[in-house]
Amino acid sequence: MAFIDYYQVLGIPKSATEADIKKAYRKLARKYHPDVNPNDKEAETKFKEVNEANEVLSNAENRKKYDSYGKDWKHAEEFEKAKQQRQAYGGRQQRPDDGFGGGDYSDFFESMFGGGGFGSRSSRVRYKGTDFNAELQLNLRDVYTTQPRVLTVNGKNIRLTIPAGVKDGQVIKIPGHGGEGANGGPKGDLYITFSITNDTPFKLDHDNLYTTIELDLYKALLGGELMVDTFDGKVKLQVKPLTQNGTKVKLKGKGFPVYKKEGQFGDLYITYQVKLPTSLSEKEIELVKELSKLSES
């Protein structure tokens, strides 16, 4: 297996931080994504390399193994065990008779990983495939309802159903959709991180939604009916007379769907912002003056 410098693939130094790795991966994944480069084999290959590099370097434990063992990082635990056993027997000293005959114990690495002898353990040990990591970018409106999606990972299309209410930064695991295992071992898993943007007038906090709407002065004073937007349509509200600026009202069950709890929703909180008129007619000015006099008496 040829050695691939994952740091070079992402264009980052070995001293790169987790944030540096994430930033570089996002930039290159967008650049080489199959949707952006249809029928481009070179871009497809680059996309796979970028994903593979990110899968290793974004995981602190895997990165440490890769830095120490390069292309053999998946077998780091076996190498470490071999080192410990070799040290226990004094480096290159003869190992005790264990039924496999004598020999230089420094050959342990070779016998374990394909060199024959000592039982050829590498042909019997099964290794789980590499876990894949992918980022799925969606809009807040996309996750208001449960919906099917097709995700392209390493050139393969994966059909999945995205539950309503999934949150920004949330990670879900899809078993068996990672890299191929070695020696008949199981496939790795696919971990999807959701990156959700919000260009709606609503602020999401857990499962509750928050918004601010303008209320004209006269309706604030006298009360009346008001049509307001919710996430799934308009509703009619009854505004109480003498409603103050900053008054909050709650619409129960008009918030965001609760993740994996069918039919359950958070609440919608509306804050009234009383809007003063920017101009008045002469008649209105007279009426305001009259109202002012009445309030002083």
Image (tube, rainbow, N blue to C red):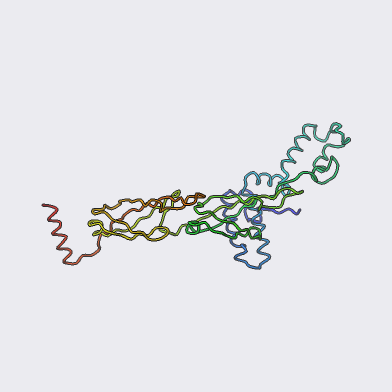
Q: Splitting the image into 4 quarters, where does residue 122 fall? A: top right
Residue 234 pos. (x, y %): 37, 61
Residue extending furthest left? 297
> Residue 163 or 187: which is nearer the viewer?
163
- 103, 181: nearer the viewer: 181
Q: Residue furthest right?
A: 101
Q: Is residue 120 left or right of residue 201?
A: right
Decide: is 221 above or below 15.
below
Q: How many marks?
A: 0
Q: Residue furthest front?
A: 263
Q: Is 264 located above or below residue 77 in the figure?
A: below
- Please indicate whether residue 2 sits to the left or right of residue 117 in the image: left
Q: Residue at x 82, y 38 (%)?
A: 106
Q: What residue sits 34% from the left and 57% below the top?
A: 213
Q: Position of residue 297 (x, y in %)?
A: 10, 52
91 relative to 246 in the view: left or right: right
- Residue 125 pos. (x, y %): 77, 44
Residue 250 position in % (x across, y down): 35, 50
